[in-house]
């Protein structure tokens, strides 16, 4: 087998684009379970191909490294190379997020999720990335202030994403950002959010401000909005 490998390597050194030699050498590496060499072989091939062909080959090399060379760091290196080629690669972003989560590197995961949000093609995708980022900042990084920003962004991008609005409201109340909480709910109302759930959120805001003398007007406005949305909302008439 070594002699065959050497022959194909010499062929590829002379003609890097030789597909027949590439396939033959790939088969030999797979047959011999020589995964380090196989990963390097796929990566080298990707370097001589146009983007449309290089990206899936790099993804294949990265997934192979992830499965067969899990402690080498090669998978992350290759996924980052894939991102350099295609900054919006869903495959690379999802894999890097998983790798960061597996090693509990929350700061790295936050960076990947931020990139995922930036690369999202649809508002709903961006909203879910922002929601996940908010949970990360709140639950793992102890930054409720940052969490509130991301929850709020998720709620604005997808008014129907009730979890994002509820978490944004809870964070704003905990941070005593009462005016921001009211603006959050008002924006959801203007965007046409489901009335019953939104009325309940307004009631929650009004109840939270019941003992806040300086915010009595905000509390009253919140309860009035709740009644306008759903006259049967529990607590709206208090």
Image (cartoon, rainbow, N blue to C red):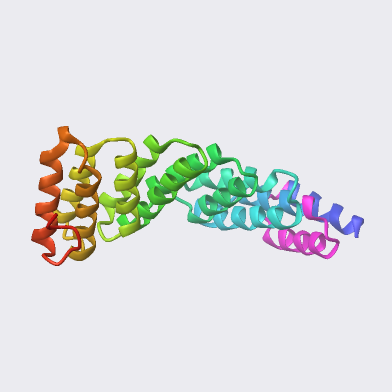
Residue 97, placed above or below residue 194: above
At a point 29% along the width and 52% down the height, the residue shown is 165
Indicate whether 147 appears above or below 238.
Answer: above
Which residue occupies the foreground of this view, 221 or 213? Answer: 213
Q: Residue at x 22, y 49 (%)?
A: 207
What residue occupies the far top of the structure in this picture? 214
State left or right for residue 231 relative to residue 82. Answer: left
Q: Where in the figure is residue 203, as x and y percent of width and height?
A: 20, 54
Above or below, 26 against 152 in this view is: below
Q: Considering depth in this image, is 122 or 175 the residue closer to the camera?
A: 175
Comparing 215 with 103, the one in front is: 215
In this rendering, position of residue 81 left or right of residue 86: right
Q: Is residue 119 left or right of residue 180?
A: right
Total numbered circles: 0
- Residue 124 placement: quadrant: bottom left
Image quadrant holding the N terminus, namely bottom right
Percent position of residue 73, x then y: 70, 43
- For the magenta stretch, what is the residue range? 14-36
Q: Is residue 25 magenta?
A: yes
Give coordinates of residue 166: x percent, y percent: 31, 53
Residue shown at 34%/42% (left/top)?
171
Residue drawn at the location 83% of the way across and 60% of the way down: 33
Q: Nearer the viewer, residue 82 or 14?
A: 82
Quadrant where the C terminus is found in the figure: bottom left
User: Residue 47: in sight, yes or no?
Assistant: no
């Amino acid at each position: 087998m070594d002699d065959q490998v050497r022959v194909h390597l010499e062929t590829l050194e002379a003609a890097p684009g030789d597909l027949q030699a590439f396939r033959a050498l790939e088969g030999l590496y797979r047959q011999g379970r020589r995964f380090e060499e196989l990963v390097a072989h796929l990566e080298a091939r990707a370097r001589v191909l146009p983007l449309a062909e290089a990206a899936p080959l790099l993804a294949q090399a990265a997934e192979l490294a992830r499965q067969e060379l899990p402690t080498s760091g090669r998978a992350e290196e290759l996924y980052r190379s894939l991102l350099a080629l295609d900054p919006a690669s869903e495959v690379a972003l999802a894999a890097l997020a998983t790798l960061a989560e597996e090693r509990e590197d929350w700061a790295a995961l936050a960076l990947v999720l931020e990139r995922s949000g930036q690369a999202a093609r649809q508002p709903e995708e961006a909203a879910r990335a922002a929601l996940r980022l908010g949970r990360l900042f709140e639950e793992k990084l102890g930054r409720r202030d940052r969490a509130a920003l991301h929850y709020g962004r998720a709620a604005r991008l997808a008014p129907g994403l009730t979890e994002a609005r509820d978490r944004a409201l809870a964070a704003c109340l905990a941070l005593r950002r009462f005016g921001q909480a009211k603006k959050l709910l008002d924006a959801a109302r203007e965007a046409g959010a489901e009335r019953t759930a939104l009325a309940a959120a307004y009631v929650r805001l009004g109840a939270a401000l019941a003992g806040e003398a300086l915010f009595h007007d905000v509390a009253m406005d919140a309860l009035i909005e709740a009644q306008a949305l759903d006259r049967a909302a529990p607590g709206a008439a208090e």
